[in-house]
Amino acid sequence: MEGQEVLENGVVGNGVAAKSSFSSGELGGIFNGVKEGMNLGDDILQDFDLYWDDISGRLMVSRMVSDSVIKGMVGAVEQEAAEKVRAKEMEMAKLKEDIQFCVTEVNGVGRLGSYALSDKQESVRHFTFSGGFMENGEMMDTLIRLRGSVKEQFEKLKKDIYDVKEHHSLRRIGSSSELVGLSGILQENKSESWGQVDKTMNRLKMTVDSVFVWVDDTLRLSKSSVVELQKEKDLQGELENMVMQNLLRSFLEDFESKLWDQNTPLCNKQIDKLSEIAMIRADLDGIFRSLPSAELGNLTSHGSHDMDTFQNKVSRDHVTPPKSQEENGKIEDSSTDVPKNFETAQLKHLSKEDLVSYFNNMIIKMKRDHESILQAKTEELFTLKAEFLRLRERGSYVPHKKDKELDVLRKKIPEVLSKLDDILFVNEKCPSIPCKDENICNLKNRLESLLSENCRLRDSLAHKKNEVNVLSSQISDATEKMHKHSMAEMKMQKLIDNLNLAVQDVDIEASIREEVYKCFIRELREELYMQLHMAREFHEAIFKEAAVNSEGTSITEIGDSDCESLIMQEMFAVIYGEAVMDFERSFKELCGDFLRERDTRICLELQASQRENDFALEADEKFKLKEELVALKKLLEEKDRVATVVSTALEKERNQFDLVSQELNSLREQLTNQNNLASENSKELNLVKGQLVEASNQIEVFKEKANLLNQKLEQKVEELKEADDQRRMALALSEERQSNLLSLEAREKDLRTQMDAIKGTIHELSTMLAEFELKVAKRSNTNGLRLEHSQTQLKSLLKKANLLRKRALVCQQTLEKRSSDLQLAEAEVDLLGDQVDVLLGLLEKIYIALDHYSPILQHYPGVIEILKLIRRELSGEYTKAV
């Protein structure tokens, strides 16, 4: 209402000034009217400033809404990043468990039963690593999808902002503003608000890009760390397998050597038993010869010759070990040669020291048993020889009455001798152990050759695996390069899009400015023409009135009027010249701005062309990298084929190794058969010994009878021959004792050599154990260092996770603050909308009042322009409401 009263007062004042005559105060009235019009224009400008402040507030609200939407997107991205961090923490926990299992596995290397468990755990660890790689791949895919969706959302937002800009610019151009100063102020406020919107969008885009880059870097680092850990796990598994294989091989070799050491006394026992059988046969042959019969001499001599030859052969075959056996020092023996109290289940849980002490006790026990058996046999032999000599000396004096009883003995003794010959003949037919040893040596040579080929194939397979790993690393590097190129391509595409948008904005602004400047120049020209026309009409009217009124005046008054008219013309000429100069200056400034904008547009076009060329070069490089990747894939396929060929060759070698092991098993079965034959022969020998005992009992009965019958005849002969018998007995006993001493010395030498060999093997075992302990200590130290390194890496990852959590909390707090600010802004927007409606009603009333006095205000162009501006704004609001 106050504005309306001011307008009415201005109109009344202007009307009074128009009705009053153009006296000396005419120019003062005109200037007062202009001042009042300027005050009215200031009020309207203030109203429009309020209006545009309201519009800028609404734009701020829209910007805050877009910020909230984008922050929601960022929150979603942060939630996904937090989920990925949780997944990574789970993976790190799994890796910790795997590292702890590796430590326990290294501590338990000495146990024999841990090999199957280590294989099982290897499979589990391989599964966890493959799961880790799959999770990394899925995370990368989700990251790429998120990046694409965010890019699409930003593009949509840019398009919406660009559409809003075009709509407002077209609306401003279509309204054909009549007031240049006001439109410039409004345009500056509008450009500042849109510039703030663009800045906030660019900052948000930069933050989202930095978040994506950071997440990508973390994923790459986790992937590289997982790959390094997998390589370390593979190397550790291979080393543990090698250690376990060497350990088992050493155990097997020790076990075979100890079995051979146990087998040699058994063979010696068998040889001793055969020598005892031969001696018993010799004794029987002597008894049979001592009997008064000359018909069986050839038979006994032949049997004794066979016995001597067999004894010599046995002593050659069994006492001296073969050369191949001495060179190898190891032989694989069957489980039947092991003692009865030998239990493999107990020995598996024993350590090396316990095994050595156990086998030493067994050797000492066997030596004691052997010595006791040998002492018993020597005592029996002395008794039998004494009885034999007695019988031999007394056999020539047996009377003829006892021939029938001796005939029975003559019939039984050849049967016993034939049985003993059969036993010796069967033992002679059996293949000797050295022959088997030669076969075993040949088989061992074949095994060594197969093992060497197997090692060579394993080395080649390891070399191929290394090549495959190198190729996989090259492929990973190529993929990383491709990813980097794709990222650079995306950045270049973003830059190109930004440059295109900037070029479009510059074009639109240049076109808008050209049109605005044209309108301004046209309006300014029209205003100048109108002012000149109005001045001419005003002067003509003044001159006419002066001519009418000056008919009765003097010449002096005409001169004064002429002076005033000349002064007015000069004033209008000065004003017009200044206006023309101002117009020329503004026109030059506009031309300079236009040239500068054209230069900037040309520079932007050149930069866009350079970016396009760089993009084309990067596309060519990307194509070349794709070709290299295809070539690397082909090489990888060829390496896989070579690996399959090598694996088939290894399977063939394994089949050959199985065949050789089957042959060894067959040889072991033959050795068991021989041992069974030896046990059967020992049983038959026991039977023969029983028969011999019976025969000796019968002989003693016959001797007693013969002694009772021939006591009288023998008394004198005994008296004569006692001295000779004693002398002979002493000589025989001395010879036997000497032979026994020699045999005992030889056995002691053999036992000493065996003990020296055993000591050497024990010393070698102790050195091997010390080396193994050193290796285990070094391995445990390296594993401890690796564990410490992994712990440091885990600490750094935990710190990063804590930082991410803190950032998420800060972002959540800021989001809550922004949401509260949005609610307050919405309330303020509602209040401002109500105020705008009130001001629009007031503006409509002012327009009605001014339109009512429009015929009077036609002489004031500024007021008419303000009316046109108000009409345009009201028509625009009306159309907007429609």
Image: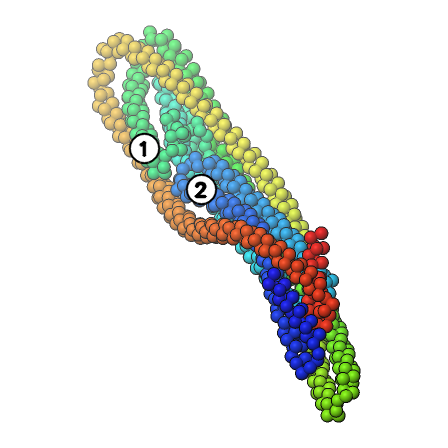
Q: Nearer the viewer, mark 2 or mark 1?
A: 2
User: 148 left or right of 441?
Assistant: right
User: Distance of mark 2 from mark 1, alpha carbons?
Assistant: 44 Å
Task: From the viewer's side, name the closer residue of 741 and 497.
Answer: 497
Task: From the viewer's side, name the closer residue of 391 and 442.
Answer: 442
Query: Which quadrant of the view contains residue 505?
Result: bottom right
Question: What residue do we see at 53% from left, 50% from top?
Answer: 823
Q: Position of residue 529 (x, y in %)?
A: 76, 77
Query: Which quadrant of the view contains residue 276?
Result: top left
Answer whether residue 468 is visible to the viewer in this image.
Answer: no
User: 254 left or right of 709?
Assistant: right
Q: Which residue was labeled with disc 1?
A: 361
Question: What residue do we see at 41% from left, 16% from top?
Answer: 416
Amino acid type, callout 2: Glu
Circle 2 SS class:
helix
Label disc, if present, on residue 143 of the rendered structure: none
In this picture, is 133 found above or below 19? above
In this picture, is 298 found above or below 398? below
Q: Position of residue 819 (x, y in %)?
A: 52, 50
Task: From the viewer's side, name the closer residue of 647 and 663.
Answer: 647
Q: Which residue was labeled with disc 2?
A: 97
In this picture, is 539 found above or below 316? below
Could you tell me which quadrant the N terminus lies in?
A: bottom right
Question: What residue do we see at 54% from left, 32% from top?
Answer: 662
Q: Position of residue 463 (x, y in %)?
A: 57, 50
Question: Which of the marked residues, 2 or 1, is nearer the chain's N terminus?
Answer: 2
Amino acid type, callout 1: Asn
